[in-house]
Every structure is written in C-alpha cells, then in structure tokens.
Image (cartoon, helix red, strand yellow):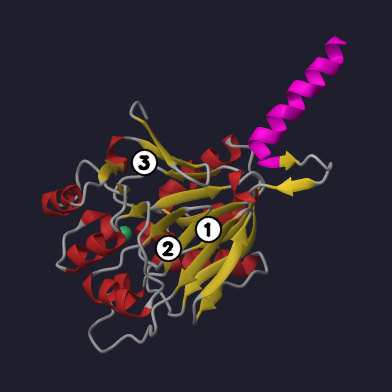
C-alpha cells in the first residue's frame, strides 16, 4: 500500500511538472510541453559574454568569454551534468566572445556551430578555426535568419543583412552581432551580443522585433542613442549586463532601463541564473561567486 501511495504521489507530481492532464475519458491532454523549465546562466567572466541556455535535455551556448574563460564555461557545464552542447553560437569574433570557443570544442561534444558571415582577425578567432578544423567540424556562417528548437523552446537567430567590411571599418564588427530570440511558452528572451547603434537600428527596422521579458543588454552596457528606442520597444522586465568592476555599465544605460521599470543585474556582481517556467521568469544571482 505504501508503495502504491508513493507511485500515486509521483504521478501527481509528474502531472504537475509535465503539464500533462488525464481527461475523464482517459485520453491524455497535452497541457503544455513548455512547462519543461528553461534555464539561462550568464557567467561572471568580466567584461565578456559566456551564456548557457539549458532545457531538460538540450543545451545552447551563446559566446564563450575570453580565452581563459573557456575552462570556467566547461567547468560550469560539466558541473551541470552536461557533456554535449547542441548549438554553439558565436555572436561575433571579438576576443571577449570567441575567446573560450576552442577550449569548449576541445572539451565537449559540440553538435553545431553558428557564426556570422565574415572573417575575424583576432588570434582567438584563428585558434577557434584551427580547433574546428582539427575536429573535422565546420562553422555554419549565417546568411539569413533561422529558427530551430531547443527542447520545448524556439530559438530565432538573426544575422545582420550584410557583413561587408568597408575600408577602414574593420573594427566595427560589433555591428555584425547575431541577435537571438528564445521563446519559451509566453516568455521571450532577447540576446543582442555587442550590437551598437547601427545594428540595433537595422534590427529594429528589419528584424523580428516585439516586447521581451528578458534582455541581455547589448555591448556590455555601453551607452548609445539607439538604446532608448530598443528599451522602449522591447520593454524588458529583467535585463542583464555582462560587465566587470573595471568596466561597469554606463550609468546612462542603467538610468534608461530603470525608466522603463526594468530590473537590472550585472554579471560583475556574480553569476546570474534566469529560470523560465513558460509563464514567468525567476532571477537569481550568486553574489558570493
Ligand atoms: Zn564584447
């Protein structure tokens, strides 16, 4: 009897967490596959981006921090019991985004690599390309927007329309940043790489723009005039800025976010975890980290 009770309790729990309801006629009503939680972790890696997005069985990584952050990212993922990354997305090839990519690819089974369609110039980019070649892998250079599933979430990746480097503008590759929207149930989470004014405006004109619940603020919180349009349109409930004590976000950027009643977190204060249950978001920050 005790055993039976335990099973019943387990089944009720499964029903609650899995969103599966058994109707009166015995048929299974699929409530919402989205209730599988989605977890996003933004690691404290200084003024750099290293972001893991996890569902129960699938993992996506957006950017890998600086060269020395690769090991921390791998440590975090392994600690979560993850051995395989379904999609690694590098938003653009600056060293604070592509730096740890070689370490990640060497240490884990990475299924798919998405990058913008241009050649990087940094040593970190070269190391990344060499490691891919050694592993017999090829990065897919995104030429147009693409949507794919990550467990019960939908991921939309939008590259810039053109990655043509004009003379003397080799340093503006922030504006080649791929922009990612993750939709999980009713929640929308937006990741903007290091997009600056020009790219933000281009995306707002041509991209899949709508209000979001969560925003990874572009370019480490460096202020520019396009942010007002972005924050006003996207109006996120929560925002995270990937920053360091040495390079905190610009105060104008934080002021502006607060104007739109957004709760602001910075990775300089510790790892940040966002948990989506498909209807609302929960934010946690590990302040001791
Ligand atoms: Zn950056």
Magenta stretch: includes residue 58? no
> From this viewpoint, which residue is outermost toward the right?
1
Q: Helix or strand or loop: what does disc 1 sit on?
A: helix
Q: Is residue 51 above or below residue 205?
A: above
Is the residue under label 2 in contact with that under label 1 (CB below 8 Å)?
yes
Question: Which label belongs to residue 44?
Answer: 3
Q: Which of the labelled discs sits on residue 102, or is there none?
A: 1
Which is nearer the N-term, disc 1 or disc 3?
3
Quarter holding the C terminus is top left
Would you say the beta carbon of the disc 2 residue lies within 8 angstroms of ligand 1?
Answer: no
Q: CA distance from mark 1 to mark 3?
A: 19 Å
**150 w.r.t. 29: above or below:** below
Of the two numbered discs 1 and 2 on the same chain, state the one appearing first in sequence.
1
Which numbered disc, 2 or 3, marks the residue that appears first in the sequence? 3
- For the residue pair 54 and 61, the one nearer the viewer reads as 54
Rate crowding at label 3 as few (under 14), some (14 to 19) or many (20 or more) other CA atoms within 10 Å.
many
Magenta residues span 1-20
Q: Is residue 186 left or right of residue 195?
A: right
Task: List the residue tagged with mark 2.
Answer: 124
* Residue 61 against residue 93 in the figure, above or below: above
**Nearer to us: label 1 or label 3:** 3
The secondary structure type at the circle numbered 3 is loop
């Amino acid at each position: 009897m005790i055993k039976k009770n335990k099973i019943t309790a387990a089944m009720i729990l499964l029903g609650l967490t899995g969103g599966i309801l058994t109707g009166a006629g015995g048929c299974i009503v699929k409530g919402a596959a989205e209730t599988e939680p989605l977890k996003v972790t933004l690691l404290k890696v200084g003024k750099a981006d290293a972001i893991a997005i996890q569902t129960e069985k699938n993992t996506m990584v957006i950017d890998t921090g600086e060269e020395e952050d690769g090991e921390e990212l791998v440590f975090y993922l392994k600690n979560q019991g993850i051995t395989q990354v379904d999609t690694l997305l590098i938003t653009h090839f600056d060293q604070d985004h592509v730096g740890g990519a070689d370490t990640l690819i060497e240490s884990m089974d990475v299924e798919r690599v998405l990058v913008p369609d241009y050649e990087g110039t940094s040593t970190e980019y070269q190391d990344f390309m060499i490691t891919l070649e050694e592993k017999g892998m090829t990065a897919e250079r995104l030429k147009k927007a693409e949507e794919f599933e990550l467990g019960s979430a939908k991921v939309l990746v939008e590259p810039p329309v053109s990655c043509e480097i004009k003379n003397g503008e080799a340093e503006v590759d922030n504006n080649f940043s791929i922009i990612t929207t993750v939709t999980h149930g009713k929640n929308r989470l937006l990741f903007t790489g290091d997009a600056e004014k020009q790219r933000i405006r281009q995306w707002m004109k041509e991209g899949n723009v709508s209000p979001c619940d969560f925003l990874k603020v572009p370019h480490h919180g460096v202020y520019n005039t396009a942010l007002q349009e972005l924050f006003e349109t996207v109006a996120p409930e929560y925002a995270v800025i990937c920053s360091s004590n040495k390079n905190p976000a610009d105060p104008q950027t934080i002021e502006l976010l607060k104007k739109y009643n957004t709760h602001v977190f910075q990775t300089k204060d510790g790892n940040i975890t966002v948990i989506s249950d498909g209807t609302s978001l929960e934010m946690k920050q590990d302040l001791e980290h």
